[in-house]
Amino acid sequence: MIPFNSGFLILLLVNLLEFFRLILASVLLISKFYNDVYYSNTYIANCNGISTQLLNEIERAFSKMLDYQLFVGEEQYEWYMQGLHYHTFAEQA
């Protein structure tokens, strides 16, 4: 379950292709959020073997899913870090 700022919880069941698209969209958006100069969507799409149109659709859908809020507050960051640590150490045991 992933909490969103709007208060809704959404269960995401992802296959490998969807996982790749989520990672690509998150890296693309965070690059644009933190950097003044970044690669174009055409370049990123070509490097990842997808069309620019598909990349634009993925970026738009991911941004909308995040309610266009890319900033993560300290409390939300800590929540995710605790979950990550729990799952990382639970799998190692």
Image: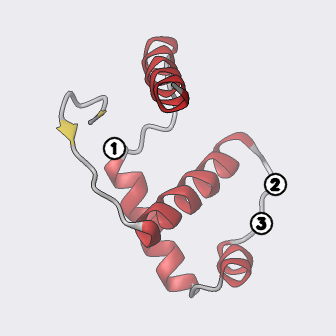
Instruction: Give residue 59's position: percent from left, percent from top.
Output: 48, 64
For disc 2, the neighbor class at 10 Å (few under 14, some 14 to 19, many from 20) is few
On screen, residue 42 above or below 86: below
> What residue lies at 52% left-to-right and 65% top-to-bottom?
20
Q: Earlier in the sequence, mark 1 or mark 3?
A: 3
Quarter of the rendering containing residue 10: top left
Number of the front mark, 3 or 2: 3
- Residue nearer the viewer, 13 or 7: 13
- Residue nearer the viewer, 44 or 11: 11
- Which residue is outermost to the front? 93
Q: Amino acid at mark 3?
A: Tyr
Q: Which residue is mark 3?
A: 39
Marks 1 and 3 close (CB-CB < 8 Å): no
- Report how far apart the C-alphas of labels 1 and 3 lie in the structure: 23 Å
Instruction: Give residue 35's position: percent from left, percent from top.
Output: 76, 45
On screen, residue 91 above or below 74: below
Q: Amino acid at mark 2?
A: Val
Task: Determine the secondary structure under disc 2.
Answer: loop
Q: Which residue is mark 1?
A: 67
Q: Tag on residue 19?
A: none
For disc 1, the neighbor class at 10 Å (few under 14, some 14 to 19, many from 20) is few
> What residue lies at 33% left-to-right and 43% top-to-bottom?
67
For disc 3, the neighbor class at 10 Å (few under 14, some 14 to 19, many from 20) is few
On screen, residue 4 above or below 45: above
Q: Which residue is mark 2?
A: 37
